[in-house]
Amino acid sequence: IPGEFLVPPLLGEFMSSHAETTAHVDIMDSITVIDSVKYGDYKLGFCGITPPEKDGMSGFKIASDEIILIAAPSHPLATAASIDLARLKNESFIGREVTSGTRQSLEQALQNRSISINSLQFRLILSHTHSVISAVEAGSGLAFVSSLGAQKSLMLGTVKKLKLAGWNVKRDFYCIYYSSGEDLRLTEEFLSFIKQKSSSPEWFAKHPAA
């Protein structure tokens, strides 16, 4: 989610004032991002789970999001006024891989409600949120996804947010970096820029980090 929806606008604005700067963004799951930054493959990263603040790893929150349940408009549950979690055990689901932040947040939210994620029937596992949403649009099943990721499809009406009783699950996104002690002026400038942008009222209105 950060790589698809948060990082591109941040990079675009930063690079507009750093004309000679180039960037390459790799999109991967949250655990791989954390490991890659920790072991020095990348100078900084963005993830959807709380980063470990140890071994020189540092991080700060840049935005918050909600995990919602979506379905194709033609799905039988799409018109339900409210849906009980127990009713979902007979439904087919599309999901992210187990190392993704979305999947881990979902698993914890279900566990807090005394429900095992294994009780849901995941027929299809995909590596990107866009792919998950596309599969939902095609009628392949239900999916718990980021509200940021589903925003455009919800506006277009190609998917519908289901009303799930007692469900209000938030998650945070973080910028993480490894404090190696190296003189990385450009990286430090970008980190300062991210901190400034993510605390501004305009950014807050779009991505409420609370």
Image (cartoon, rainbow, N blue to C red):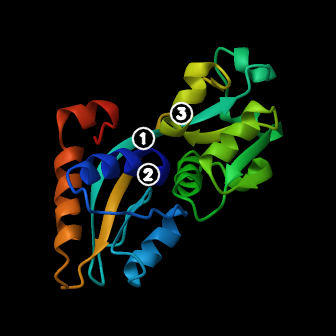
Q: Position of residue 6 (x, y in %)?
A: 39, 47
Give the SS element for disc 3: loop
Does residue 182 appear in the picture of this structure? yes
Q: Which residue is mark 3?
A: 167
Q: Which residue is mark 2?
A: 2
Amino acid tagged 1: Asp
Give the SS element for disc 1: strand
Against 184, residue 162 (above or below) is above
- Between label 1 and label 2, give the one nearer the viewer: 2
Disc 3 or 2, which lies upstream in sequence? 2
Q: Which residue is mark 1?
A: 65
Q: Residues within 10 Å of mark 2 (few under 14, many from 20)?
A: many
Q: CB of mark 3 within 8 Å of CB of mark 2? A: no
Q: Position of residue 182 (x, y in %)?
A: 20, 85
Q: How many marks?
A: 3
What is the C-alpha distance between the residues marked 3 and 1?
14 Å
Q: Residue furthest front?
A: 20
What is the C-alpha distance between the residues marked 3 and 2?
23 Å
Amino acid tagged 3: Trp
Q: Position of residue 85 (x, y in %)?
A: 67, 35
